[in-house]
Image (spheres, grey):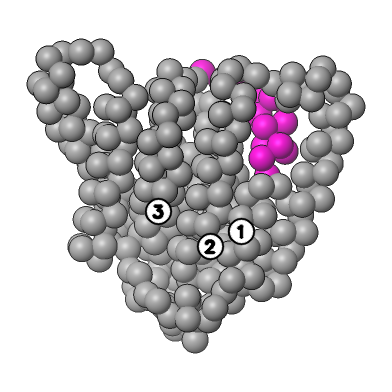
């Protein structure tokens, strides 16, 4: 547990220090101009790259090609399908909740509104967050010290897998620092934690996380209004909203079931 907290603090320190340095340099070069999309994208990309490099270099997260050698293409495929199926139900669930503050609304609009934003949001952020939250934090919560982990380690873990997964999901939600994102991040973090526990690899989570962020990026291109509701997208018909949720669940639930059947650990 102590190492899991230290890894999370290391991640936060990279964001604060790295982000501060990048923004300071940008401020000096631009002569104190207002925030731009380029500045936000550069800051996010640099912090994500620093996170990946430091966590792998210091072996805070252990990466092995052993799981990839099992040719898990079915798992990766269903991970992407599950991310697709979760979009509408997640939006519907969020709309049913009390309205939460959106502290990063303007920043997201700027990043998602630029094609270069995909470099950070669609590619680097999913990889860096999976390395930290699953490959580092959850691995320690599960008591794994090697990659791939051994059955002996599994027998001597300090907490149950579902407790570890739930804690890691809560931490994943909190690091977004934006209340409106937290419920969705917690649910996704729970699913990603389950995938990591079942496989011992961050790759299914990276695939899901990449697909989730990519779909968000594409949807913003069609519906740039951050306050748009599902009923607006479906022409004001609540019936169509319910049908869209039901159709999406018919994608999501079978995808999760297929993941349950096909996920396995590397020998």
Q: Which residue is drawn at 57% across and 74% down?
A: 72
- In the rendered structure, which disc, 2 or 1, sits on the residue that comes first in sequence? 1
Q: Position of residue 256 (x, y in %)?
A: 70, 59
Q: Position of residue 34 (x, y in %)?
A: 25, 13
Q: In this rendering, is residue 231 above or below 19? A: above
Q: What element carries label 3?
A: helix
Q: In this rendering, is residue 216 above or below 80? A: above
Please give the residue where the numbered disc 2 appears in the rendered image.
204
Report whether residue 18 is seen. yes
Q: Could you say which is closer to the camera, residue 195 or residue 139?
A: 195
- Within 10 Å of the Cα at label 2, are there few (<14), some (14-19), or many (20+) other Cα atoms? many
Q: Could you say which is closer to the camera, residue 2 or residue 144?
A: 144
- For the image, the number of numbered tags is 3
For the residues marked 2 and 3, what is the alpha-carbon distance in whole angstroms? 11 Å
For the residues marked 1 and 3, what is the alpha-carbon distance in whole angstroms? 15 Å
Q: Position of residue 195 (x, y in %)?
A: 56, 62
For the residues marked 2 and 1, what is the alpha-carbon distance in whole angstroms? 6 Å
Q: What stretch is highlighted in magenta?
A: 86-101
- In the rendered structure, which disc, 2 or 3, sits on the residue that comes first in sequence? 3
Q: Residue at x 86, y 21 (%)?
A: 237
Q: Can you name the residue that lies furthest to the bottom here?
A: 267
Q: Where is residue 136 in the image (x, y as percent from the top left)?
A: 35, 59
Q: Is mark 1 on a helix, strand or loop?
A: helix
Main secondary structure of the magenta stretch = helix
Q: Residue 127 carries which label?
A: 3
Q: Which residue is drawn at 52% across and 42% down?
A: 213
Q: Do the residues labelled 2 and 1 touch (CB within 8 Å)?
A: yes
Q: Is mark 2 on a helix, strand or loop?
A: helix
Please give the residue where the numbered disc 1 appears in the rendered image.
79
């Amino acid at each position: 547990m102590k190492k899991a907290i230290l890894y999370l603090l290391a991640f936060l320190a990279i964001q604060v220090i790295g982000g501060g340095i990048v923004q300071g340099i940008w401020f000096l070069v631009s002569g104190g101009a207002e925030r731009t999309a380029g500045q936000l994208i550069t800051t996010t990309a640099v912090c994500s790259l620093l996170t990946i490099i430091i966590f792998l270099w210091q072996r805070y997260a252990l990466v092995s090609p052993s799981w990839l050698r099992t040719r898990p293409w079915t798992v990766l495929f269903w991970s992407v399908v599950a991310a697709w199926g979760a979009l509408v139900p997640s939006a519907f669930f969020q709309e049913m909740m009390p309205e939460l503050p959106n502290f990063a609304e303007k920043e997201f609009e700027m990043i998602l509104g630029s094609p270069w934003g995909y470099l950070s949001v669609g590619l680097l952020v999913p990889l860096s967050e999976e390395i930290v939250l699953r490959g580092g934090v959850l691995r320690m919560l599960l008591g794994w010290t090697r990659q791939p982990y051994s059955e002996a380690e599994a027998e001597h873990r300090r907490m149950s897998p579902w407790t570890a997964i739930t804690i890691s999901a809560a931490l994943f939600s909190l690091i977004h620092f934006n209340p409106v994102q937290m419920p969705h991040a917690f649910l996704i973090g729970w699913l990603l934690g389950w995938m990591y526990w079942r496989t011992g690899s961050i790759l299914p989570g990276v695939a899901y996380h990449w697909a989730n962020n990519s779909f968000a990026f594409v949807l913003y291109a069609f519906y740039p209004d951050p306050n748009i509701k599902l009923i607006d997208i479906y022409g004001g018909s609540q019936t169509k909203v319910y049908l869209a949720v039901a159709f999406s669940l018919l994608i999501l639930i079978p995808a999760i079931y297929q993941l349950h059947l096909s996920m396995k650990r590397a020998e």
